[in-house]
């Protein structure tokens, strides 16, 4: 892949969608040459849904409960992303494992940020505060952010970029989370633009 010409980006989020907000802002200020297309959320009452509506981004609620099954939700996610022309998909705090239909529809085109330096502190159940608590419990001197491709195994896909974040004396999971999240919001848009420019080739990482 030699770069994407103004790709459309779909987002999946369950709660605040903080990285979605950072990427949308970067798209709208021109530092990322892409178009935010749609948010799909499994949480109808999420802050991400409210933010998307308030900021002119199409927002669609899809869950197994609303569609009747995990498989039908998987199909509905694909339908929503395709209907809005998504070329790339960003997981912005999406708390559900992606289904096979979504993975097959967007092979090597789904990106996620993990709040640690994979392969450390990854895998099922390792998200949010759980990660930061584990980092502190292990006595790590540093942690960080990993942007990676998404496949059918938690936190397993190819690593695209990492940023290191020091662990400070007196850190709590909340304090560390805030410092890591600040770096996520810098790293994710930068990686996205490197993909668009062709510097990162998703087909050969």
Image (cartoon, helix red, strand yellow):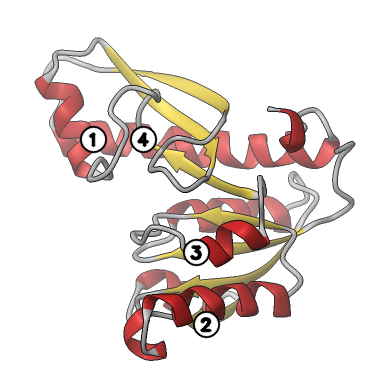
Decide: is 70 above or below 119.
below
As helix, strand or loop, the secondary structure at mark 3 comes to strand
Q: Name the residue under label 2.
A: 60
Q: Mark 3 points at which residue?
A: 12
Asked if the residue at tag 1 contacts the one at tag 2, i.e. Cβ–Cβ closer than 8 Å, the answer is no
The reply to whether residue 24 is visible in this rendering is no
Q: Name the residue under label 4.
A: 115
As helix, strand or loop, the secondary structure at mark 1 comes to helix
From the image, which quarter does the N terminus lie in?
top right
Which residue lies at the image location 68% right of the left edge and 27% below the top edge?
A: 205
Q: How crowded is mark 2: few (under 14 residues within 10 Å), some or many (20 or more)?
A: many
Asked if the residue at tag 4 contacts the one at tag 1, i.e. Cβ–Cβ closer than 8 Å, the answer is yes
Disc 2 versus disc 3: distance between alpha carbons?
10 Å
Spot occupied by residue 161 in the image (x, y as percentages of width and height): 57, 26
Q: Name the residue under label 1.
A: 131
Disc 2 versus disc 1: distance between alpha carbons?
29 Å
Compared across the picture, whether 132 is left or right of 9 comes to left
Q: Residues within 10 Å of mark 3 (few under 14, many from 20)?
A: many
Which residue lies at the image location 57% right of the left edge and 57% below the top edge?
A: 103
Spot occupied by residue 141 in the image (x, y as percentages of width and height): 25, 10
Q: Name the quadrant containing residue 34.
A: bottom right
Spot occupied by residue 81 in the image (x, y as percentages of width and height): 65, 72
Spot occupied by residue 167 in the image (x, y as percentages of width and height): 25, 17
Nearer to the camera, 185 or 115: 115
Q: Name the quadrant containing residue 79.
A: bottom right
Disc 1 versus disc 3: distance between alpha carbons?
20 Å
């Amino acid at each position: 892949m030699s770069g994407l010409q103004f790709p459309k980006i779909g987002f999946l989020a369950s709660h605040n969608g903080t990285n979605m907000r950072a990427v949308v802002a970067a798209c709208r200020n021109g530092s990322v040459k892409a178009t935010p297309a749609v948010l799909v959320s499994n949480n109808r009452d999420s802050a991400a849904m409210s933010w998307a509506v308030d900021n002119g981004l199409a927002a669609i609620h899809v869950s197994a409960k609303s569609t009747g099954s995990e498989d039908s939700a998987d199909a509905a996610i694909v339908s929503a992303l395709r209907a809005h022309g998504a070329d790339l998909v960003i997981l912005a705090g999406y708390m559900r494992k992606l289904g096979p239909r979504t993975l097959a529809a967007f092979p090597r085109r789904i990106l996620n940020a993990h709040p640690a330096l994979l392969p450390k502190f990854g895998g099922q159940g390792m998200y949010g505060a759980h990660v930061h608590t584990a980092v502190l419990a292990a006595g790590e001197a540093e942690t960080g952010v990993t942007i990676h491709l998404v496949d059918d195994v938690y936190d397993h896909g190819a690593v695209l970029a990492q940023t290191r974040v020091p662990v400070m004396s007196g850190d709590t999971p909340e304090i560390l989370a805030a410092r890591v999240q600040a770096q996520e919001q810098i790293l994710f848009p930068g990686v996205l633009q490197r993909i668009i420019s062709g510097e990162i080739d998703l087909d050969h990482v």
